[in-house]
């Protein structure tokens, strides 16, 4: 080989190695002269930005590392489990501008397993054209489709894909004998969540009991609810959390206020129409903003909860059959069986909201429905406390409802229709954990915007304010 050929070859090799080395850094966006200093988990010395990016993405750190600040003058970096949005934004006024901030770009394709030259053709729900596999993955996991999309077949030559609500196991496995192998199959990863990044291994289990009045438990003639009673005994309880007032006492506005800590004039959910979108962030999305690798899960049989009231960045969604509480319970038990359970779970039970008989706490029908749902909660609590690492975790269990009822209906502003409740317990069957909240909270009035979101935000130490506020007896 002559000198010019050797030079060209070396140039190609150098360019190739440079491009390969730069791949980790391509996963990050950079903001010059900015940082989130003070939120680092690990500091590295004598490194380049490329090496910091590669370290952040390696297997020992990828479960928590989502950003880093690079010290330009001293070749160091601080790796962090938080991004700028989760700590109130970037700071840009450091004297001398010594830092650049690098934030990880999430790649939806990482949530899929690819099977080359295979498909489940014929089971598509939606066909997309002029797209890459990454764009198909982004569409499948986006807020409008994540509650049903489980896989997609990618047309390699045509650059198109079929999104499906089926997995290969649902349709008798993959087909792999298509002429010329035009497809690759992508299946959403399920069965395990990544390690929980929240300090103290804190989690949230939000239990929603549709239509349960606060005065229908914890009284002499009330339904027998040993599992909710156990949560109350070791935690805190308010039996008259006021829904409604400036909004109607129906499920859409009620659950939106529970999830956001705002009333309908702020969150925008004024009815049960699925066309309405949350105008304030779901509390599970606030968790993701502070901890981008945190995961969330929702199980519900009411379509609004798996569509327009769904967290924007939810990871696991399961729509159980209509009022099939056992099916919902089994799904939560499955999530709790994983080594790394989702960071936050919403578990919805529908059967108390009967619409047919009476919301009267003395009604035998109402009591029977409450008792059956309490038994479902008992199964979940048993699965939770049986987790192998439960002693090293801290779960805030929040139980609440969307509205009360009067006679056989709701929607108005009577005391009975406005009456909901909240239970807060962070050390169920784990007494070594200091109590976040204890006792009867009725000494101070509470409204629905005070119930779940402000206490979850406070418990996790998130930097966000809502229209509601935590009860003064709660907190550390």
Image: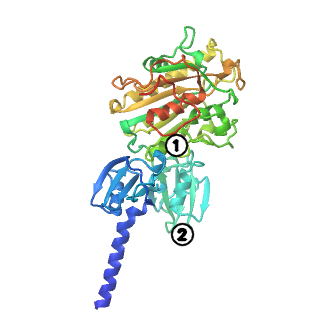
| Residue at x 67% of width, y 40% of height | 268
The disc, 1 or 2, on the residue closer to the chain's N-terminal end is 2
Farthest residue, direction bottom: 2
Instruction: Report the side of 302 relative to 386 (left or right).
Output: right
Q: The residue tagged with tag 1: helix, strand or loop?
A: helix
The one nearer the camera, 189 or 29, is 29
Question: Residue drawn at (41%, 50%), measured in percent from left and top?
Answer: 36
Gap in angstroms between the C-alphas marked 1 and 2: 37 Å
Name the spot of residue 293 as percent of width and height, x first: 43, 47
| Residue designated by label 1 | 285
Answer whether labels 1 and 2 touch (C-beta < 8 Å).
no
Q: Is mark 2 on a helix, strand or loop?
A: loop
Neighbours of disc 1 within 10 Å: few (<14), some (14-19), many (20+)? many
> Image quadrant of residue 383?
top left
Image location of residue 103, percent across then percent down:
43, 55
Viewer-closest of 238 and 184: 238
Residue 157, numbered circle: 2
Residue mark closest to the camera, 1 vs 2: 1
């Amino acid at each position: 080989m002559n000198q010019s050929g050797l030079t060209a070859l070396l140039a190609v090799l150098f360019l190739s190695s440079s491009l390969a080395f730069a791949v980790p850094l391509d996963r990050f966006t950079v903001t010059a002269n900015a940082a989130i200093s003070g939120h680092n988990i690990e500091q590295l010395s004598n490194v380049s930005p490329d090496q910091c990016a590669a370290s952040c993405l390696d297997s020992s750190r990828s479960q928590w590392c989502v950003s880093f600040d690079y010290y330009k003058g001293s070749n160091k970096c601080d790796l962090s489990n938080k991004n700028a949005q989760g700590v109130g934004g970037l700071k840009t006024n450091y004297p001398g501008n010594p830092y650049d901030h690098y934030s990880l770009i999430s790649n939806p394709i990482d949530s899929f397993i690819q099977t080359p030259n295979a498909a489940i053709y014929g089971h598509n729900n939606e066909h997309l054209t002029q797209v890459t596999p990454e764009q198909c993955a982004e569409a499948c996991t986006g807020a409008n489709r994540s509650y049903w999309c489980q896989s997609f077949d990618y047309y390699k030559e045509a650059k198109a894909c079929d999104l499906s609500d089926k997995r290969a196991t649902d349709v008798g496995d993959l087909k792999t004998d298509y002429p010329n192998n035009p497809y690759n199959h992508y299946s959403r990863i399920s069965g395990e969540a990544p390690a929980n990044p929240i300090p103290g291994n804190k989690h949230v289990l939000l239990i929603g009991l549709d239509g349960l009045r606060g005065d229908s438990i914890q009284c002499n003639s009330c339904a027998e609810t040993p599992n909710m009673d156990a949560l109350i005994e070791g935690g805190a309880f308010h039996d008259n959390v006021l829904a409604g007032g400036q909004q109607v006492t129906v499920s859409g506005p009620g659950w939106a206020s529970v999830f956001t800590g705002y009333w309908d004039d702020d969150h925008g959910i004024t009815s049960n129409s699925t066309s309405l979108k949350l105008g304030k962030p779901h509390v599970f999305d606030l968790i993701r903003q502070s901890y981008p690798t945190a995961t969330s899960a929702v199980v519900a049989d009411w379509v609004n909860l798996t569509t327009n009231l769904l967290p924007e960045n939810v990871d696991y969604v399961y729509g159980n059959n209509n009022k099939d509480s056992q099916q919902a319970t089994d799904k939560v038990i499955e999530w709790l069986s994983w080594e790394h359970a989702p960071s936050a779970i919403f578990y919805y039970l529908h059967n108390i909201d009967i619409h047919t008989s009476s919301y009267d706490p003395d009604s035998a029908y109402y009591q029977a429905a409450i008792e059956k749902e309490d038994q479902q909660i008992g199964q979940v609590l048993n699965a939770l406390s049986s987790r192998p690492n439960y002693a090293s975790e801290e779960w805030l269990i929040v139980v609440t409802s969307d509205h009360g009822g009067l006679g056989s209906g709701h929607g108005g502003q009577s005391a009975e229709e406005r009456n909901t409740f909240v239970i807060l317990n962070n050390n169920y069957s784990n007494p070594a954990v200091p109590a976040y909240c204890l006792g009867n909270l009725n000494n101070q009035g509470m409204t629905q915007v005070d119930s779940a979101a402000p206490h979850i935000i406070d418990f996790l130490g998130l930097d966000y304010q809502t229209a509601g506020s935590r009860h003064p007896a709660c907190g550390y």
